[in-house]
Image (cartoon, rainbow, N blue to C red):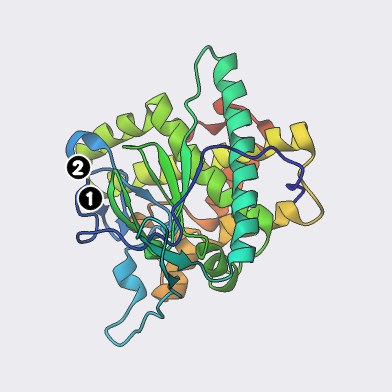
Amino acid sequence: MRWRTGRRSENVEDRRGEGGGSGGPFGGGRAPLRVGRGVGIGGGVGGLVLVVVLLLLGVDPAVLLTPGDQVAPRQSPAVLGPGANGAPQFQVPNAGVEDEMKQFVSVVLADTEDTWTALFKASGKRYAEPRLVLFTGVTQSACGLGEAAMGPFYCPADQRVYIDLAFYDELRNDFGAPGDFAQAYVIAHEVGHHVQNLLGISDQVESLRRRASRQEANNLSVRLELQADCFAGIWANHAQQARQILEQGDLEEGLNAASAIGDDRLQRQTRGYVTPDSFTHGSSAQRVRWFKRGLAEGRLSACDTFSTQVL
């Protein structure tokens, strides 16, 4: 992916090495509503929720572990000693690599800003740019305490995308989805949730989910997630037109990432069987299909996952 010559966004907030937050999981914020075995889009006062993508997984983290499973701890930043203001200084492991990754995500975020600013302007609207927060291990968000184990997520309450860059190691090693375009797809998907928030789609879906059965609520979650995949495709379409970002193999990387995090594939890997009624993010084929649709057409109207009968 050709990214080094791209514009850098000023909306990247680097919290790496700051250490953890306080309180229990999602303490001090709105906890997400769990629907079936997935993390839903609703919950909390006013329907502002934590949309979690390890969920790019679409399964409850509990099903990934049996009582005897052990989770390998992440490498923590090393304390270097007190800084000039008396606060501890931290050294982030692999700082050189992560500094380059910060540049990378900054360029991808800038591309999404350019894409959605133009599309919103064309429809007479103003695009409010989200901020992207880099963190290590845990961090506070307006939706509560965010943890690296949750994967990248978008918090509508503060209009921020959160990511621990170690997730990209998991994307490559655990999900078999390497490559910079696969990494860019993750960011573009989360920004897609921000677009849904600005357009009022997320609130409408949450209102419907509150009155729906579990199966109907899961179906609404799937449609919301597939639309975010389609919006990621719209970003790729416009970034390609503007800067010719795609290199040989990039498209395959993006499609492989979308396929790797389909509900059916992940459930088969973690449980050994598939239960479609519990899907909250969509099957591998569905995620690939909607990403490709956004990439091919580059229009918001191409991403209406709520009117179609066949996903």
The residue that appears at 27% across and 43% down in the rendered structure is: 42
**Which residue does the numbered mark 1 point to in the structure image?**
31
Is the residue marked by circle 2 packed among few (<14), some (14-19), or many (20+) residues within 10 Å? Answer: some
Is label 2 in contact with label 1 (beta carbons under 8 Å)? Answer: yes
Q: Residue at x 42, y 25 (%)?
A: 199
Answer with mark 2 or mark 1, whichever residue precedes in sequence: 1
Q: Position of residue 240 (x, y in %)?
A: 75, 38
Residue 25, given in percent of the width and then of the height, sits at: 24, 60
Q: Position of residue 129 (x, y in %)?
A: 50, 30
Instruction: Answer with left or right where residue 289 lies relative to residue 138.
Output: right
Q: Which residue is mark 2?
A: 44
Q: Amino acid at mark 1?
A: Ala
Q: Tell me the residue at 64%/51% (across/down).
A: 104
**Label 2 SS:** loop
Vertical position of residue 215 compared to residue 115: above or below? below
| Residue 273, picture quadrant | bottom left
Residue situated furthest right in the rendering? 248
Q: Where in the figure is residue 268, as x and y percent of width and height? A: 45, 71
